[in-house]
Image (tube, helix red, strand yellow):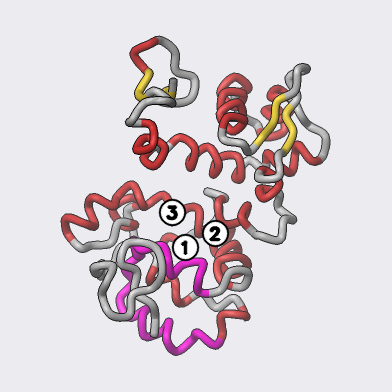
Amino acid sequence: MVWAGLGCSGEGNVVADRDGPDHGIWALADLVTPMAMRVAATLRVADHITQGLRTASALAEVAHVDTDTLDRLLRHLVTAGVLDLDESGGYTLTDRGESLRDDHPSGMQALLDIDGAIGWADLSFVGLLHSVRTGEAAFPVQFGRPFWDDLGSDPRRTASFDAHGYRRRGLGATRGRGLRLGVPGARDRCRRRQRNLADGDAACVSHVAGHGLRPAGHRGSGSGGIGCRGSG
């Protein structure tokens, strides 16, 4: 059976049978695994495991989090194929889990890190219904201020955006996000500064989370996301 969250118990929390017809839909809709991945990336779980901290208690101590809740999260990541759990209660990384290391060439840890700019902005996807209903940006509704104001208020997110938002992944790191940030005038800045992406210039983030949603087939739409427009 598939359970409706971390640390749930009782038959009332069962939401879908793994062998039932609804499981495929639930696998697409379930929010637990995407958030568990982001929490693990934020807490640097893969790095700590690589350094030899393999039990839930040791990982919780170094990450300054609750041991029982972390253990439930880690066990969920075992079912997702990100971690393995041995008979002694020690966690190890699978090949998939290796991608969460900070030094992995994919750069996924930085992109999923909720304390970083991109991972933080991704949380505005919970406001997708608002954007679909109104065509307005989701980020200000979620966080109470526009993206650039929020980014400028946090030196850590600003640094992570410059370091990882574009230099590692280029425009593709944000073109496919679909739910855009809604920064007036930023599309023109995006066009002017495409050539500077390799230097970490982050002006093109306007196409991440909430402004000017267009149908997916609209001329000039980028790949992936929800009708994400390209900058060209």
Distance between mark 2 and mark 3 Cα atoms: 13 Å
Name the residue nearer the viewer: 173 or 14: 14
Callout 3: SS = helix
Residue beneath the point at 29% across and 50% down: 127
Q: Amino acid at mark 2?
A: Arg
Q: Are marks 2 and 1 in contact (CB under 8 Å)?
A: yes
User: Residue 184 colored magenta?
Assistant: yes
Q: Measured from the top left, where is residue 1 in percent x and y? A: 44, 20
Q: Residue furthest top?
A: 10
Task: Give me the C-alpha separation between circle 3 and circle 1.
Answer: 13 Å
Q: Is residue 132 left or right of residue 227?
A: left
Q: Give the label on residue 122, or none.
A: 3
Instruction: Count residues near mark 2 (Cα–Cα under 10 Å), then give few for <14, some for 14-19, many for 20+.
Output: many
Q: Which residues are magenta?
A: 171-195
Q: For mark 3, does the 10 Å Cα neighbourhood hold few (<14), some (14 to 19), or many (20 or more) residues? A: some
In the rendered image, which residue does mark 2 sit on? 157
- Above or below: residue 226 compared with residue 92: below
Q: Which residue is mark 1?
A: 151
